[in-house]
Amino acid sequence: MNFTKPLLTTALAAFMLTGCYNEPGLVQDTSNSRTMTGAAAGALAGSMIGYNTGSHNTKSALVGGLLGAAVGGAVGYSMDQQANEIANALGTGVNNDPLAALDPKREILVSKSSDYVKIMFRDPMMFATDSAKLQPHARSKINKVRTVLANYPQTTVAVAGFTDDQGSYSYNQRLSERRAQTVADILAVNGYPLVRGCSYDKAIAANNSAANRALNRRVEVYLYSDKNKMADPCQ
């Protein structure tokens, strides 16, 4: 029995389906990599299920693959769409350049990976020194994220706070957690987010200058379509 033909057929169907998920008006990022990955993975899984439960024939594999591609592509599309909608609401675009985090002019950075969308909010827009009280401009921006998340009840949210290395690790641990909780309180529209305080772990830049320490003081928001793929943001 040759399973190669139905696999190739459903893989083609997956890519055809991803081409259907281009909605006008989504800004900046047009890669739709998450959509294509989801559709391809769904097609493969669906093909195998259809083949194994449908008399081991090509037709069953094709039907299963098409259904799997549709489901997987829809999940990918949802995350791609969220990334673009959030970036648009925050007045920026989706930027996956790893060097973007080193640009001090970027107070907000929206990026995406295969497992999550990440929104980085960085000082000085967020908090005053030694404070966990959001400044008005930052609160306004985070409320914009909340508005978008309200349309995606299936999304799982995690919030992590990070500091520079001024002061003790334990003090910065508490401060980073309180800052993350402040943001999480606003974003708890579909359930309370996972909250982590990371102190000065996972620094973006060496804490050897005022400019670099400012890069490290930040809050990161992670959006997952699958809570089982959540990772420790402090690692």
Image: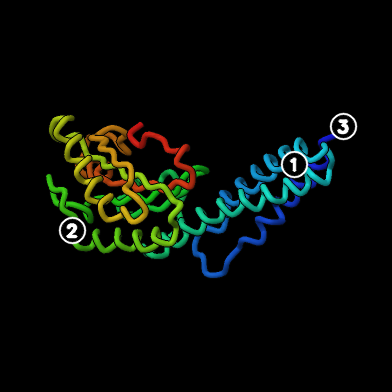
User: Mark 2 belongs to which amino acid?
Assistant: Gln
Whole-percent x, y for residue 91 in the image = 37, 65
**What residue lies at 36% left-to-right and 31% top-to-bottom?**
235
In the depicted view, which residue is nearer to us: 47 or 107? 47
Horizontal side of 73 relative to 225 (left or right) equals right
Pick whichever of labels 3 and 1 is earlier in the sequence. Answer: 3
User: Mark 3 belongs to which amino acid?
Assistant: Met
Element under label 2? loop
Whole-percent x, y for residue 192 in the image = 31, 48
> Which residue position holds label 1?
50
Which one is in front in this view, the residue at disc 3 or the one at disc 1?
1
**What residue lies at 27% left-to-right and 56% top-to-bottom?**
186
Q: Which mark is residue 19?
A: none
Q: Where's the N terminus, which quadrant?
A: top right
Element under label 1? helix
Pick whichever of labels 3 and 2 is earlier in the sequence. Answer: 3
Residue, far right: 1
Which one is in front in this view, the residue at disc 2 or the one at disc 1?
1
**What residue lies at 25% left-to-right and 52% top-to-bottom?**
185
User: Mark 1 belongs to which amino acid?
Assistant: Gly
In the depicted view, which residue is nearer to us: 215 or 29? 29
Residue, far bottom: 25
In the depicted view, which residue is nearer to us: 186 or 163? 186
> Which residue position holds label 3?
1
Whole-percent x, y for residue 10 in the image = 75, 47
User: Badges 3 and 1: C-beta atoms under 8 Å apart?
Assistant: no
**What residue lies at 52% left-to-right and 56% top-to-bottom?**
78
- Marks 3 and 1, how far apart in space? 15 Å
> Which residue position holds label 2?
135
Q: Residues within 10 Å of mark 2 (few under 14, many from 20)?
A: some
Horizontal side of 229 relative to 76 (left or right) equals left
* Residue 93 position by quadrant: bottom left
